[in-house]
Amino acid sequence: MKDKEILDKIAFILSGETFFSHEDVIYNVKTHEPKDDCLANFFLHSLNDRFRFNDLLDQDDLEEHLNSLGIWTFEDEQKFKDSEEHVEKLKVGLFESLYNKRAQKSIRSQISGIRKALTKARLKKYSLFDQSIEYHNMQFKKRFFVGVNLYNLQGEKLYTASDFHSIPTNIIDKGVERWDDECNISQAEIREIVRSGTWSTCWNLGETSLFGKPIGMLNDIQKTCLVFSKMYDNARQSTECPPDEVFNDDDMFDGWMTKQKEKIEQDRKKRRADQLHESKTKGSSSDAGELFLMAESPEEATDVARLNAFAERMRLRDQMREVKSAGEEGIHEADLTHTQMDLRRQLMDSQKR
């Protein structure tokens, strides 16, 4: 984005309000309060009970309907989720290829291709969303929030909740259109904004008091800005803080974040295994270098396997191959390649001593 565009968006984000004109009158739309959400839900329950929108489907029924028509099947949904997960894995690969430009180019191409396919798939997935109860509820709430948060330039509130149905439709239409235009900020744009010098200055001076109101009074975009600002702060303070090149690349930064989460989870599981090992060997004179944990499910087996270091996982993989190659005859542990290598290493160490 250009600097001017970033400054305009920051002004909207910080203020949480915008302006529009109708018939030479200027109106001010402000962020709705939590109580407006409660009121909107109350009105929606009343409307749904009164009119019984039999022609509309709820989200679950809509998914069943799309599946029966073959427009968006349950298999399509699973493929969609698998593709999203694959993108996250590719992001990790992108970070790991930080100093390999050729590998980066290949991975970026894969990510771009999958994203294009996901965008096309979303059109099918949400092709009938406008026929759902959730869609109509969302539209009602959007109009309600704008209607009851209209002010004049003197700061006077023009309508209350009880006046909502008497507000001129064309005024609400213009207000909703203007608010939607202002809120049309993608996640990538928000991340670019919070990395900008202008936002960083404001953030460093104000942080959570930046908006001058409690967090519960903030709109979704303001909360998202807080989340990303905190996220980047935590990354800067990390002992494994990545270079600026990673910070400025959303996909690469996401890959770094995933790696950090995996490492934290790995360390947590290792501490758990160490505690278990300590409790098992307490009072025992055993100096065994290995601890065998029983897994009760394939998922637990995977978790236990991940507790091993990379070199040990390679060793286990090679041993499994030898066991499979031996077939029904089996193979004695002493005949395993790694066991023989360990014995030779111990013999050489003994001779040196």
Image: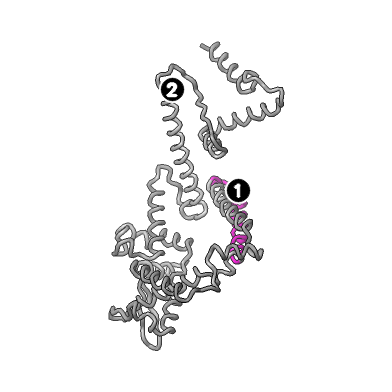
Above or below, comparing residue 334 to residue 216 in the picture: above
The image shows residue 127 at horizontal and vertical percentages of: 59, 69
Q: Which of 91 and 201 is in front in this view?
A: 91
Model colouring? one colour
Instruction: Point out which mark residue 304 bears.
Output: none
User: Can see residue 158?
Assistant: yes
- Please tell me how crowded label 2 is: few (under 14), some (14-19), or many (20+) other residues with Cα within 10 Å: few
The residue under the point 37% across, 80% down is 164
Image-quadrant location for residue 278: top left
Residue 17 at x, y percent in the picture: 36, 72
Q: Does the magenta stretch include residue 98?
A: yes
* Residue range (magenta): 96-123
Q: Are marks 1 and 2 in contact (CB under 8 Å)?
A: no
To which residue does mark 1 refer? Answer: 103
Q: Which mark's residue is nearer the viewer, 1 or 2?
A: 2
Q: In the figure, residue 192 lies in which quadrant? A: bottom left
- What residue is drawn where x is 45% and y is 77%? 177
Dot 1 amino acid type: Ala
Could you say where residue 5 lies in the image, as x and y percent from the top left?
44, 69
Name the residue rendered at 40%, 85% in the picture. Answer: 168
Q: Could you tell me how far apart the alpha carbons at marks 1 and 2 are, in whole angstroms?
A: 46 Å
Query: Which of marks 2 and 1 precedes in the sequence?
Result: 1
* Vertical side of 305 occupied by 241: above or below: below
**Prevailing secondary structure class for the magenta stretch in the rendered image:** helix
Kind of residue indicated by mark 2:
Thr
Q: Residue furthest bottom?
A: 23
Is 124 left or right of 274, judged from the image as shown? right
- Classed neighbour count for the residue bearing mark 1: other residues with Cα under 10 Å, few (<14), some (14–19), many (≥20): some
Residue 180 appearing in the image: no
Residue under pointer 2: 281
